[in-house]
Image: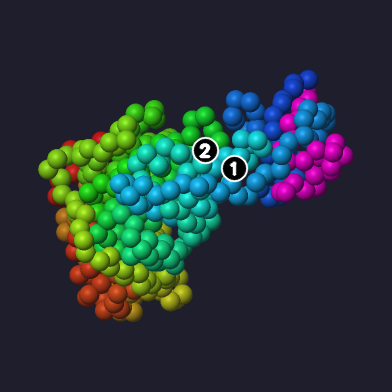
Amino acid sequence: MGYKGSSQKFLELSGVSIGDIIKIIKNNVSYQGILLDRAEDPDDKHIVLKLDNGYNIGLNVEGALLELIKKGEKPKLKLSTLDIGKDIEKPDISIISTGGTVASVVDYKTGAVHPAFTADDLIKANPELLVHANINGEAILNILSENMKPEYWAKTASSVADEINGGADGVVVAHGTDTMHYTSAALNFMLDTPVPVVVTGAQRSSDRPSSDAFMNLLSSVVAAKSDIAEVTLCMHAEENDSHCLLHRGTKVRKMHTTRRDTFRSINTLPIAKIEKGKLSLVDKNSYYKKRNNENVELNNDIEKKVALIKSYPGIEPDTIDYHIDKGYKGIVIEGTGLGHCPETLLPSLERAKESKIPVIMTSQCLYGIVNMNIYSTGRKIVSAGVISVFNMLPETAYVKLVWALGQTENIEEVKKIMQTNIRGEIGEKSSEKYFLN
């Protein structure tokens, strides 16, 4: 288990182990719950209890008294096998897990939360999924989303293609929320899919009363059997459990650290909403690629050495020079306003041009457009060889450049790719109606 040092000695002296129901008395306050395992970290003084209300609490063991209430069961790393036949009247949906809390299950006898590695695990935790589809589950990664890398995008895209080639009528990708919108953008560029591919996650884990995991996963399965054959992202629409929204994977962003409705479509409307197990279009006139009988096309060649740099007052030219000297093949600048950075960077931008390193300009404003022809600084930046993109999210531009440089090293070809609307990443000219929608 993850305990060490003083907390480990405290538990060993008391003869308790993970899964036991215990009472801790600290400062004349009593806490009772299930002893949970914990992540390994430098702090060795705290233990974790799951209280009866479903929430977890950390308690410092110094000066605490412990009473064993009842011995519990050891956490199970795998749930029991289910004998469920296939319903030929229902579509086959594959759920691929890369990690995160949405594809996890709770062992209610111990309070522990475990990754769901198989279809049996997912179905036992979410039996309602079978109302909508036959479920196949596979874990290809088990990482926190902040540890996601471009090569993992490529691996995920390959796994999605394998599921589609194997007969899946739709694919759901379970993912941690922190970098989920990077992955949804990457899968868009790497896959030309004939069936829906839906990326989803959860802000709150499945052991919490306020978890959004079940609703997000169920809504994603509904979206995966729909007619929308794009890579999309499905998450809560509101803080309550009214419905989920289906966002275009290249135009969505995480906008809040903890809210369940953290993901918002930027400079566009969501494609659809899923409410009570039914999908409806947000705008009946909106374009989306429809399900078809064509083969899936996989193109997941990438260039990992791409940097995303935020412009800020006082940024020094050596920030650009560093990446040139370190052999980076591309740079995305998250500029200010319409796409600006200090003029002091111009010599370094010229150097990148001479080194045939494409530099892409986006805006940290998120809403609105990039136009470097309005002010003199912008025009100088263009003359230095910087490539503008109209209204692409910085994260999407970074992902697209990683992918574009995997297709070609020719800077003019890269420019053409970056300025061409491939997967809805470049939107309409006017975005006023979508501002903070």
Q: Is residue 423 visible?
A: yes
Residue shown at the point (21%, 64%) measured from the top left? 294
Residues under numbered marks 2 and 1 in contact, where contact means CB atoms less than 8 Å apart: yes
Residue shown at the point (30%, 63%) measured from the top left? 191
* Front one among 426 and 301: 301
Q: Amino acid at mark 2?
A: Ser
Q: Of helix, strand and loop, which one carries label 1?
A: strand
* Front one among 233 and 114: 114
Q: Quadrant of the C terminus?
A: top left
**Which residue, as the protein is rendered here, is positioned at the far left?**
285
Task: Please give the residue where the numbered disc 1 appears in the rendered image.
Answer: 113
In the rendered view, tell whether residue 270 sits above or below residue 21: below
Q: How many marks?
A: 2
Where's residue 139, x and y in %? Answer: 50, 57
Task: Please give the residue where the numbered disc 2 appears in the rendered image.
Answer: 206
Where's residue 80, x and y in %? Answer: 59, 46
Where's residue 71, x and y in %? Answer: 77, 34
Q: Earlier in the sequence, mark 2 or mark 1?
A: 1
Q: Amino acid at mark 1?
A: Val
Say which quarter of the image contains residue 269.
top left
The magenta stretch is 1-27
**Which residue, as the protein is rendered here, is positioned at the far right?**
13
Where's residue 311, x and y in %? Answer: 37, 56
What number is the disc on residue 129? none
